[in-house]
Amino acid sequence: MLSKSSYLIFIISGVIGISFWIGFNVNLLPTEASINAPIYDELFKILFIIGLILFIGMSLLVVYSLIKFRKRKGQIGDGIALEGNLKLEIIWTVIPSIIVLFVGLYSYNIYDRMGGMNELNHDHSAMGNNSEKIWAGISQSNNNLSLIDTNIEVSAMQFAFLFNYPKGDFISGELHVPVNKEISVKMESKDVIHAFWIPEFRIKQDIIPGQPTVLNFTPTKVGKYPIICAELCGPYHGGMRASIIVEEQSDYENWFNQNKKDELKA
């Protein structure tokens, strides 16, 4: 006959085991298509597993309490008066504290690996006016824009994105980029606050009027992905979408050469 402690250890182990299995085998996120995606997904899985452990554990505890402390047939009056349990209070204070500390430190590590702690002193000579103050988003990419493979200017307005390719002197309604190359987008809003969100890349950056922002990323998977405005910007906010098309280098060069100004074709 197993003791109460053995049953408790068995149940806790089962809850943790089930939570880890679900966390690593049930994928709730869209496909990974940038170098940032696997890093972000690590954090999501850990938070998902912690949430599952708490949810399943608390659900079992509630069910146990409903059965254990239910009113018995013929019982008159209230149940046993219980007041204070120092051991229990220490447990439910220490365990959440450890979880919060772990999540905080792990989140900082993820943020750092995604480039959030990189210096923001970018060289903006590749994108025009050097005296212009430009803000930087999270990026693992090179801080020197002149060394980045592709520089693109993004204009956000109610209710569309426009993409300017300075080297080709043309504007496109779709964002075309080569795969496995560093991309830098300088984003500006023409009216209200917008957001540049690509779920498959795990990147989202607010675009604030009067505050040009540079965001760098590296796509890793060929395909067509949605660009969504994730900041409420007006009555047609839900329709403010565009597409990013990630292509092989040769396909991207063909598209670029077909669209660039005739005087630049040589």
Image: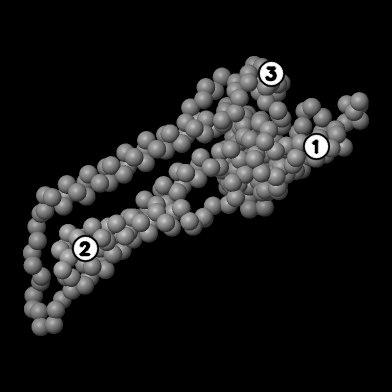
Q: Residue at x 80, y 37 (%)?
A: 250
Where does residue 242 sit, x and y in percent of width and height?
Answer: 70, 47
Q: How crowded is mark 2: few (under 14 residues within 10 Å), some or many (20 or more)?
A: few
Q: Which of marks 3 and 2 is nearer the N terminus?
A: 2
Real-space Cα separation, disc 3 to disc 2, in angstroms: 66 Å
Image quarter (top left, top right, bottom left or bottom right) of the N terminus: bottom left
Q: Which residue is drawn at 10% across and 83% down?
A: 74
Where does residue 155 sit, x and y in percent of width and height?
Answer: 70, 36
Asked whether residue 114 is in view, the answer is yes
Q: Which amino acid, by three-letter code, is at mark 2?
A: Tyr
Q: As drawn, which residue projects farthest toward the top? A: 131
Real-space Cα separation, disc 1 to disc 3, in angstroms: 27 Å
Q: At numbered mark 3, what does the secondary structure look like: helix, strand or loop? A: helix
Residue wearing tag 1: 250
Location of residue 155 with respect to 233 vertically, above or below: above
Q: Which residue is drawn at 10% across and 54% down?
A: 84
Image quarter (top left, top right, bottom left or bottom right) of the C terminus: top right
Q: Of tags 1 and 3, which is closer to the observer?
A: 1
Q: At numbered mark 1, what does the secondary structure look like: helix, strand or loop? A: helix
Residue wearing tag 3: 125
Residue wearing tag 2: 7
Q: Which amino acid, by three-letter code, is at mark 3?
A: Ser
Q: Of tags 2 and 1, which is closer to the observer?
A: 2
Q: Earlier in the sequence, mark 2 or mark 1?
A: 2
Q: In this view, does 157 lie to the left or right of 60?
A: right
